[in-house]
Amino acid sequence: METLYIVVPCYNEEPCLPETAPVFRQKLASLEAAGLISPASRVLFVDDGSADGTWDIIRSLHESDPAFCGLRLKPNRGHQNAVMAGLMEARERADITISIDADLQDDIDAMDGMVRKHSQGFPIVCGVRTSRTTDTFMKRFTAQSYYKIMNLFGAKLVYNHADFRLMDKDALEKLSRYHGEDPFLRGLATRLGLPIATVEYERAPRVAGESKYTLKKMVKLAIKGFTSARCKPENTPRPPDPHIAERLFS
């Protein structure tokens, strides 16, 4: 059985974490009971410089249950940097990782299919939305247009996939060769030269809180998508993130 780290980026998730943290814990327990992961598996929350009580909640979770771990970044670094920091921290501790947002709009039960796909020989497994019925019309329109434009510019993206993704040690080692600030992870995942499988799921409304992706951030993400194709891997792994202010591990 392999050790799984669920990497959860968090930014001002004080309203959300008390509701979603038990769901993450239960998923670890069910995967372990099914014989799919080892008892050493963990949930790794990455606090991306939150201005509310997110880190206090993460600390309390860790003190009550060693299956909860934490990283605190300072200052706010952005979603992709937070995910990367969590993945690189988990790289030395886990056999496989699954990144997922704290709001649980992505179907946590799809993790079972991801782990099984990995056992079939896929080092990367992407969660893919079957529909966008929970989005506004404008968000659906801009998302569909975004993928079409990216394809025209030669960027290889998995359609309707964001950052709900399984990556194993081999994939993370290759990912670690990409340095620089603010990576575009969904673009880099398809450039590692590894087989990719997909698992479909229905996206749900947020459990609590509100979306952190403003229009400005969505435009910035689109620009990153265009420029990511020019990124080249380095000969050495990424250095440790200097913005990690605190670690909580058992």
Image (cartoon, rainbow, N blue to C red):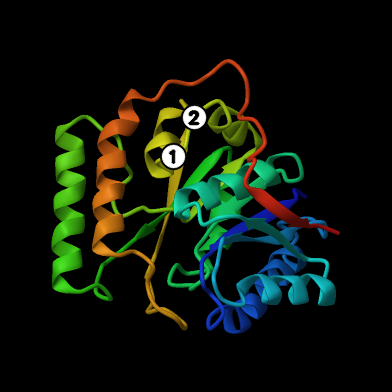
* CB atoms of marks 1 and 2 within 8 Å: no
Q: Position of residue 115 (x, y in %)?
A: 60, 53
Q: Earlier in the sequence, mark 1 or mark 2?
A: 1
Residue 164 horizontal side relative to residue 32, left or right: left
Other residues around mark 2 within 10 Å, as few (<14) / some (14–19) / many (≥20) = some
Q: Position of residue 178 (x, y in %)?
A: 50, 28
Residue 171 horizontal side relative to residue 223, left or right: right
Q: Position of residue 86 (x, y in %)?
A: 62, 50
Checking the image for residue 183, the label placed there is: 1
Helix, strand or loop at disc 1?
loop
Residue extending farthest to the right is 250
Quarter of the rendering containing residue 92: top right
Vertical relation: 179 (above or below) 82: above
**Which residue is at the front of the view, 121 or 249?**
249
What whole-number distance in Å separates the C-alpha atoms at marks 1 and 2?
18 Å
Q: Where does label 2 land, which residue?
A: 194
**Which residue is at the front of the view, 126 or 99?**
99
Amino acid type shown at disc 1: Pro
Vertical relation: 173 (above or below) 184: above
**Which residue is at the front of the view, 240 or 97?**
240
Vertical relation: 85 (above or below) 6: above
Amino acid type shown at disc 2: Leu
**Which residue is at the front of the view, 4 or 179?**
179
Helix, strand or loop at disc 2?
loop
Quarter of the rendering containing residue 84: top right
Vertical relation: 44 (above or below) 151: below
Residue 7 horizontal side relative to residue 30, left or right: left
Kindly identify the residue that appears in the image at 51 percent across and 64 percent down: 110
* Image quarter (top left, top right, bottom left or bottom right) of the C terminus: bottom right
Kindly identify the residue that appears in the image at 54 percent across and 32 percent down: 175
